Image (tube, rainbow, N blue to C red):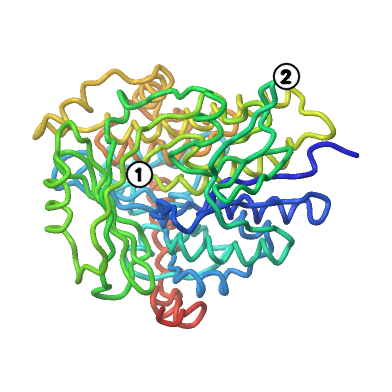
């Protein structure tokens, strides 16, 4: 009999059911997949904003976009608006999609920088169709327009949707609390789980989706955790839902406060809100009060406190256990990467799934790729905190003056010197994302690429105006965001 035929997933929520859906889709009836969860254990469930890569995950599963959005009360997301991050009163948007037009020799920001210095260009962000569409509260799906998008949706409803999907493909769900984890004496591999009911569940591959508890990867295998709180000091969040006060906007808002930041995520039936903060600089009661004072609409739920520690499991695959989601590490939701890291973790597992034997070299490669991905996303999130001119609170003074990873320091310095950011390997955020945040938060590059001088002043003006004209024409054709939702994926009131 072949080994590695039975996959046990510990924990439900987004991580568990995304894993179950992807694994059952990939392996079909060739693997036995069991998911253990307990209704008595809550899930974090606030990963309601996504990035465009989630579309490829749903496509991989064969999910119909309109149906999925109806079921999850979803809306569309064109980017994230950052308010008060560079300085109080500032605002900029990190959009999906292209800004301007790139050439193979130099990206658009080089052409824009010369034109701006000559008084021939508007703000860099005025050349993003995503931003202009978002600010106009419009939306349309057109692969030829250059507009890219993601979603806002109810994470709990998404998990429930994927549960139905997974069970229809043979995944067996067991309701129960895990009492004991048994390991093999000869190699330390996990052998079985004993539920409080006394039932013993044996498996070959164990996927730890138990959230912050990290029941298998840490409590059982003692893998170790790399703490990044000295770079990302926020360690708590308070979350609450409110009624909608108007049509949903097609972007996420991230509003910086004196010791953290607030999110606003509009769904079809409500708005998700939360405050991420550092407990060294704000008490839980003060954070709750600050959030409730800065809400729009009637509060629908009791504020919920979430405690966390930023960092990652030193090995996300250890022995026969792979940690997915919060069990593998946590990076605060500033750039909506939580669900993406679940997606890449389980897809990486599928691509490296062991045959008859678990190969250590495969484990090492999985961990190397996971570490690289986590560290580059970590650097991108640190960038938002570190590149600020705010001096109004101890929290921002700490963030502005703290030491940062060498990998991030190098990126910032290269951008200052060359107006370029160079993507390394397959890191998540592309060059445009990095330079949008740095430019949006006040870093002024020193010079542009010399190839720009090939264009005359008249040609540079024509380039800038042609981009604006093209965007004007597109915008005239786009319907309102709510109008598009009503036509495409209007959900019933829950």
Position in image of residue 43 (x %, y %): 43, 52
Which quadrant would residue 330 be assigned to in this image? top left
Please provide percent x and percent y for residue 58.
61, 59
Circle 2 residues within 10 Å: few <14, some 14–19, many ≥20: few
- Whether residue 422 is visible, yes or no, is no
Q: Secondary structure at mark 2?
A: loop
Q: Spatial distance from mark 1 to mark 2, Cα to Cα? A: 43 Å
Residue 117 got which mark? Answer: none
Tell me, yes or no, whether the two marked residues, 1 and 2, touch with CB atoms within 8 Å: no
| Circle nearer the viewer, 1 or 2 | 2
Element under label 1? helix
Q: Position of residue 60 (x, y in %)?
A: 68, 56
Q: Is residue 324 left or right of residue 172?
A: left
> Would residue 264 be visible to someone looking at this image?
yes
117 lies left or right of 430: left
Query: Which labelled disc corresponds to residue 186?
Result: 2
Relative vertical location of residue 75 with respect to residue 224 in this rendering, above or below: below
Q: What label does residue 334 carry, if any?
A: 1
Quadrant (top left/top right/bottom left/bottom right) for the N terminus? top right
The C terminus, quarter of image: bottom left
Which residue occupies 65% across, 65% down?
Answer: 165
In this image, 199 relative to 420: left or right? right
Q: Residues within 10 Å of mark 1 (few under 14, many from 20)?
A: many
Q: Nearer the viewer, residue 123 or 367?
A: 367
Dividing the picture into quadrants, the one containing residue 266 is bottom left
Task: Say which residue appears at 40% left-offset and 17% top-offset.
Answer: 406
């Amino acid at each position: 009999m072949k080994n590695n035929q039975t996959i046990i997933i510990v924990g439900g929520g987004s991580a568990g059911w995304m894993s179950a859906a992807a694994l059952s889709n990939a392996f079909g009836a060739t693997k036995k997949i069991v998911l253990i969860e307990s209704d008595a254990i809550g899930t974090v469930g606030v990963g309601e904003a996504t990035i465009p890569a989630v579309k490829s995950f749903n496509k991989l599963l064969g999910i119909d976009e309109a149906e999925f959005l109806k079921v999850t009360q979803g809306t569309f997301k064109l980017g994230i608006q950052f308010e008060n991050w560079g300085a109080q009163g500032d605002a900029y948007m990190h959009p999906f999609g292209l800004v301007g037009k790139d050439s193979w020799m130099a990206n658009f920001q080089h052409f824009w920088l010369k034109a701006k210095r000559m008084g021939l260009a508007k703000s860099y962000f005025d050349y993003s169709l995503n931003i202009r569409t978002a600010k106009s509260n419009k939306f349309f799906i057109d692969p030829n327009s250059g507009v890219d998008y993601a979603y806002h949706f109810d994470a709990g409803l998404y998990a429930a949707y994927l549960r139905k999907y997974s069970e229809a493909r043979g995944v067996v769900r067991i309701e129960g609390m895990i009492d004991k984890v048994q390991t093999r004496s000869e190699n330390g591999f996990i052998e079985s789980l004993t539920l409080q009911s006394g039932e013993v569940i044996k498996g070959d591959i164990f996927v730890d989706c138990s959230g912050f508890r990290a029941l298998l990867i840490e409590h059982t295998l003692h893998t170790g955790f790399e703490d990044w709180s000295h770079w990302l000091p926020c360690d708590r969040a308070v979350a609450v839902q409110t009624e909608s006060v108007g049509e949903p906007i097609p972007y996420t808002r991230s509003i910086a406060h004196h010791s953290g930041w607030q999110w606003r995520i509009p769904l079809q039936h409500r708005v998700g809100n939360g405050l991420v903060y550092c407990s060294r600089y704000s008490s839980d009661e003060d954070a709750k009060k600050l959030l409730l004072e800065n809400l729009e609409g009637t509060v629908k739920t009791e504020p919920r406190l979430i405690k966390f520690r930023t960092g990652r499991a030193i090995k996300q695959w250890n022995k026969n256990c792979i940690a997915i989601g919060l069990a593998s590490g946590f990076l605060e939701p500033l750039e909506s990467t939580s669900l993406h890291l679940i997606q890449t973790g389980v897809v990486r597992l599928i691509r490296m799934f062991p045959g008859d034997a678990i190969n250590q070299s495969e484990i090492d490669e999985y961990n190397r790729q996971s570490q690289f991905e986590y560290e580059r996303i970590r650097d991108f999130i640190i960038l938002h905190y570190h590149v600020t001119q705010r001096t109004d609170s101890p929290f921002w003074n700490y963030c502005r003056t703290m030491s940062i990873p060498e990998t991030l320091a190098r990126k910032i310095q290269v951008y200052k010197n060359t107006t370029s950011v160079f993507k390394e390997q397959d890191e998540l955020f592309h060059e445009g994302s990095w330079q949008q945040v740095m430019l949006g938060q006040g870093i002024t590059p020193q010079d542009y690429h010399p190839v720009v001088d090939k264009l005359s002043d008249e040609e540079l003006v024509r380039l800038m105006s042609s981009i604006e004209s093209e965007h004007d024409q597109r915008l005239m054709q786009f319907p309102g965001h709510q109008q598009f939702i009503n036509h495409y994926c209007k959900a019933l009131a829950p």
